[in-house]
Image (tube, rainbow, N blue to C red):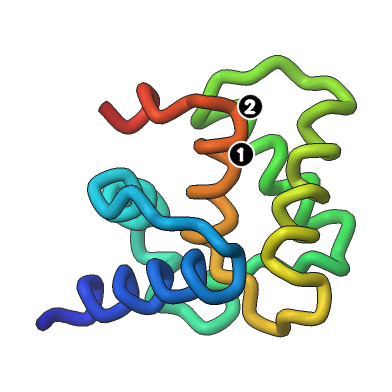
Amino acid sequence: MGKREELIAKYADDLKTKCGMTPDMDLLTKVTIGCGPAIYNADSSTVAASSDSELETVKNNFLIKKLGLKDGPELMDAINAVIETYGKSERNKYRAVVYYMLVKHFGKEGAYA
């Protein structure tokens, strides 16, 4: 099993155990691949939920640019809801898991079709 497959398995486990979701493995794989090389770097593979600038980056670069959503307060509300679901006390919030939950939240699976 390659490094990417190991990470996808770890993300799937997080979705099951920490977020109470059954992951769509095909979509999770596509979201993970969409994150590019960021998943292999300890710093960029996670989302710093306590950093407002980090959350703005997720909103601007992922929700607006990648998913094509219009800017509005509902975007930050969704990010905060995902962080809440993942668990505020959870130290490592993996970027691919956060992005996956946001894709599901907004019903934007088509962005990865």
* 10 vs 2, nearest the viewer: 10
Is 109 on the left-hand or right-hand side of 67? left
Q: CA distance from mark 2 to mark 1?
A: 6 Å
18 left or right of 34 in image = right
For residue 57, above or below residue 61:
below
The 10 Å Cα crowd at callout 1, few under 14, some 14 to 19, many 20 or more, is: few
Badge 2 crowding class, 10 Å Cα cut-off, few under 14, some 14 to 19, many 20 or more, is: some
Disc ID at residue 26: none
Name the quadrant containing residue 78.
top right
Q: Which residue is mark 1?
A: 61
Quadrant (top left, top right, bottom left, bottom right) of the N terminus: bottom left
Tell me whether the residue at label 2 lies in contact with that at label 1, contact meaning CB atoms closer than 8 angstroms. yes
Residue at point 68% right, 65% down? 86
Q: Position of residue 23 (x, y in %)?
A: 39, 55
Q: Give the residue type that dot 2 points to.
A: Ile
Label 2 secondary element: helix
Q: Position of residue 92 (x, y in %)?
A: 63, 80
In the image: residue 88, left or right of residue 112: right
> Closest to the observer: 7 or 104?
104
Question: Residue at horizontal 63%, vertical 27%?
Answer: 64
- x and y, in percent, of residue 43 in the image: 59, 79
Can you identify the residue that label 2 sits on? 64
Q: Which residue type does callout 1 highlight?
A: Asn
Identify the residue at horizontal 87%, vertical 68% (top origin).
50
